[in-house]
């Protein structure tokens, strides 16, 4: 039995998707299905229950997953140590991040990195912050890039950069005429925000409370692109990281106003499982991110 087959099995369990596992391992979905049939034939038991839009472990599959996960992690650590000895920058690099970072903070570094090291297979996925931490601990990803990185068990944080938070509003809004305003001017204004469990939303709410500002959240969304589109049509205002709205400011569909009370910064961090052995490809990826 190949270790790659066990890894694919673990990826299916963790993503609950044959297609996602295929993408992570750079193979076709039919190849993934064939690998699972081979495993089930080898052990003479059904390992996965396939229902519409979901994948569940059978009791036999649960046993195989628990053991396989440990084997796969040990094998990945072994490969990373051996690659580090050769200093060959090649192989897979698995990264997870949120949309507001991946789309606006990583694109230039990713392009330069892949041009410099064409033998690297980079898998970038977009996820929610809590899942990124979970995937890092489980070894499903090599690195996560998150906003407001927090200290958690089994997680190491590498500081990355800081974004300035600005007020985004439609060009015709009265506040858009100002270059900067006091945060108190937002009192009673309609706001479009992230969902409440998203770190940037939590910190925004703390910031507003600190200045005694009460706003009305008219919409709560989990995707920064949707937030910007809603602000563009005049539904409300939004407090967003400045790099994420540069394109809209250039095209004049949004206006940004700085908050004058203080410089509100959103820290970004690179996270990974404590004690994880990095391959040269992962080490170089971290270097490229921090070099900017």
Image (spheres, grey):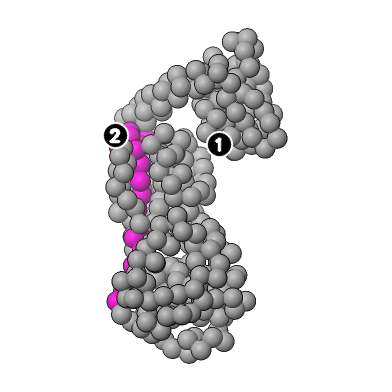
Q: Earlier in the sequence, mark 2 or mark 1?
A: 1
Looking at the rendered structure, the secondary structure element under dot 1 is helix
The structure residue drawn at horizontal position 38% and vertical position 76%, both measured from the top left corner, is: 213
The structure residue drawn at horizontal position 29% and vertical position 34%, both measured from the top left corner, is: 275
Residue 52: x %, y % from top left:
70, 35
The structure residue drawn at horizontal position 36% and vertical position 28%, both measured from the top left corner, is: 77
On the rendered structure, is 118 left or right of 234? left
Disc number at residue 168? none
Residue 26 is covered by the magenta coloring: no
Work out whether 220 lies above or below 72.
Answer: below
Q: Quadrant of the N terminus?
A: top right
Q: Which residues are magenta?
A: 262-281
Residue 11: x %, y % from top left:
53, 31
**For this rendering, which residue is in front, 145 or 64?**
64
Residue 190: x %, y % from top left:
51, 76
- In the rendered image, which residue does mark 2 sit on? 275
On the rendered structure, is 142 left or right of 48? left
Q: Badge 1, how many Cα within 10 Å: few under 14, some, many 20+?
A: some
Q: Is residue 4 visible?
A: no
On the rendered structure, is 81 left or right of 13? left
Residue 189: x %, y % from top left:
48, 79
**Mark 2 against mark 1, which lies toward the viewer?**
1
| Distance between the alpha carbons at the discs numbered 2 and 1 | 24 Å
Looking at the rendered structure, the secondary structure element under dot 2 is loop
- In the rendered image, which residue does mark 1 sit on? 15
The structure residue drawn at horizontal position 55% and vertical position 80%, both measured from the top left corner, is: 170
């Amino acid at each position: 039995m190949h270790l790659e087959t066990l890894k694919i099995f673990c990826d299916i369990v963790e993503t609950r998707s044959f297609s996602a596992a295929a993408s992570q391992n750079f193979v076709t979905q039919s190849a993934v299905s064939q690998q699972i049939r081979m495993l089930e034939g080898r052990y003479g038991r059904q390992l996965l229950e396939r229902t519409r839009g979901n994948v569940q472990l059978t009791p036999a599959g649960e046993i195989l997953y628990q053991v396989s996960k440990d084997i796969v992690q040990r094998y990945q650590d072994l490969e990373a140590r051996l690659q580090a000895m050769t200093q060959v920058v090649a192989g897979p690099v698995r990264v997870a991040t949120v949309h507001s970072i991946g789309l606006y903070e990583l694109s230039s570094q990713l392009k330069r990195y892949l041009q410099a090291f064409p033998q690297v297979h980079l898998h970038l996925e977009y996820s929610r912050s809590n899942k990124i931490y979970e995937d890092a601990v489980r070894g499903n990803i090599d690195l996560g890039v998150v906003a407001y990185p927090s200290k958690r068990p089994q997680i190491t944080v590498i500081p990355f950069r800081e974004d300035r938070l600005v007020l985004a509003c439609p060009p015709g809004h009265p506040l858009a005429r100002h270059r900067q305003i006091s945060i108190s001017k937002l009192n009673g204004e309609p706001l479009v925000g992230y969902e409440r469990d998203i770190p940037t939303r939590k910190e925004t709410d703390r910031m507003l409370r600190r200045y005694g500002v009460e706003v009305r959240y008219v919409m709560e969304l989990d995707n920064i692109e949707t937030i910007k589109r809603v602000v563009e049509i005049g539904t409300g205002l939004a407090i967003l990281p400045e790099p994420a709205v540069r394109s809209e400011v250039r095209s004049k569909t949004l206006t940004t106003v700085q908050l004058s009370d203080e410089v509100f910064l959103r820290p970004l961090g690179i996270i990974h499982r404590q004690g994880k052995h990095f391959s040269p490809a992962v080490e170089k990826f971290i270097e490229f991110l921090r070099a900017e």
